[in-house]
Image: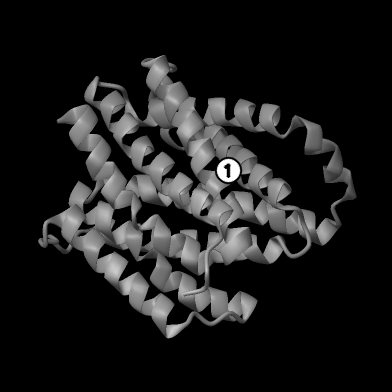
């Protein structure tokens, strides 16, 4: 593996920590009886406002982005929203154990997309490291037992495929567009689409419990926002493969925070 700088390590640990804690915070909210759809809808609304506030000073730069780059940014947001929806659908028709592990197949797909879109090849050491991390995640998440098959498992694998494409595509866009603009577009467009699509696809009754458990919703929105920022800044520095491979360590932090906060 290539040598990793201190700032890159901060971002890599940041995404693992924030996403690992995010999973537990959302679980705590759901344990209180919060509706999953309302939770996702409310979180997305807050994410929209956080992204506008955080990147407000840079929004003026949008007018300088070329049309084809703007098109790619919109595609990135749409793809991200699709990943969230497919993952949600898959999680609802498979076991938590299967979903928790299968989504971590993402680095395998990143290998292919990185070669096709970026002409990047991972070193043998990096690939070996990925399989070690993947095997560790398998043991940690599933306790060595993966129950298959479920139709939801296929959807989780498709979500992993979409996420892999999304991360590699983001790296490609960063060749012409600033990292912060890529992060903003990824977060803002996907969250906005979720806000628009959930009531349309599933009915307005799906948001009947809007902003119940507000403290959990706000904390989840902040952690999600931080995880995306850390992830994409790491992708800019070391590429999507190393970033996604380190993302596997989120299993460890989820287990740690689950033990501390949920017993």
In this rendering, the answer to whether 242 lies above or below 36 is below
In this rendering, the answer to whether 245 lies above or below 215 is below
**Residue 72 pos. (x, y %):** 71, 59
Q: Residue at x 35, y 37 (%)?
A: 21
**Residue 107 pos. (x, y %):** 41, 68
Image mark count: 1
Q: Quadrant of the C terminus?
A: top left
Label 1: few (<14), some (14–19) or many (≥20) C-alpha neighbours in 10 Å: many
Figure coloring? one colour
**Residue 91 pos. (x, y %):** 29, 47
Q: Nearer the viewer, residue 128 or 141?
A: 128
Tell me: 101 left or right of 181. Answer: left
| SS at mark 1 in the image | helix
Q: Residue at x 44, y 25 (%)?
A: 219
Query: Which residue was labeled with disc 1?
Result: 190
Tell me: 186 left or right of 65. Answer: left
Q: Nearer the viewer, residue 87 or 182?
A: 182
Q: Does residue 90 show up?
A: no
In this rendering, the answer to whether 30 lies above or below 185 is above
Q: Residue at x 74, y 65 (%)?
A: 175
Farthest-out residue, right:
64
In this rendering, the answer to whether 58 lies above or below 139 is above
Q: Does residue 160 show up?
A: yes
């Amino acid at each position: 593996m290539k040598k990793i700088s201190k700032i890159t390590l901060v971002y890599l640990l940041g995404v693992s920590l924030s996403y690992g804690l995010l999973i537990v915070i959302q679980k705590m909210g759901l344990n209180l009886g919060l509706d999953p759809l309302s939770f996702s809808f409310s979180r997305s609304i807050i994410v929209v406002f956080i992204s506008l506030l955080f990147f407000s000073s840079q929004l003026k730069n949008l007018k300088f982005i070329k049309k084809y780059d703007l098109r790619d940014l919109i595609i990135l947001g749409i793809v991200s929203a699709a990943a969230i929806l497919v993952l949600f659908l898959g999680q609802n028709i498979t076991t938590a154990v299967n979903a928790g592990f299968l989504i971590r197949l993402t680095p395998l797909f990143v290998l292919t997309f990185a070669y096709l879109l970026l002409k990047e090849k991972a070193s043998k050491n990096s690939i070996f490291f990925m399989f070690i991390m993947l095997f560790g995640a398998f043991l940690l998440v599933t306790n060595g037992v993966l129950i298959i098959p479920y139709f939801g498992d296929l959807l989780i694998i498709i979500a992993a495929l979409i996420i892999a494409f999304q991360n590699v595509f983001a790296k490609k866009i960063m060749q012409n567009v600033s990292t912060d603009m890529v992060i903003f577009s990824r977060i803002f467009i996907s969250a906005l689409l979720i806000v628009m699509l959930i009531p349309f696809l599933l009915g307005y009754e799906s948001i009947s419990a809007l902003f119940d458990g507000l403290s959990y919703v706000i904390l989840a929105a902040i952690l999600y926002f931080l995880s995306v920022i850390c992830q994409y800044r790491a992708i800019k520095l070391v590429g999507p493969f190393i970033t996604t491979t380190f993302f596997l360590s989120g299993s460890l932090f989820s287990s740690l925070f689950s033990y501390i906060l949920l017993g």
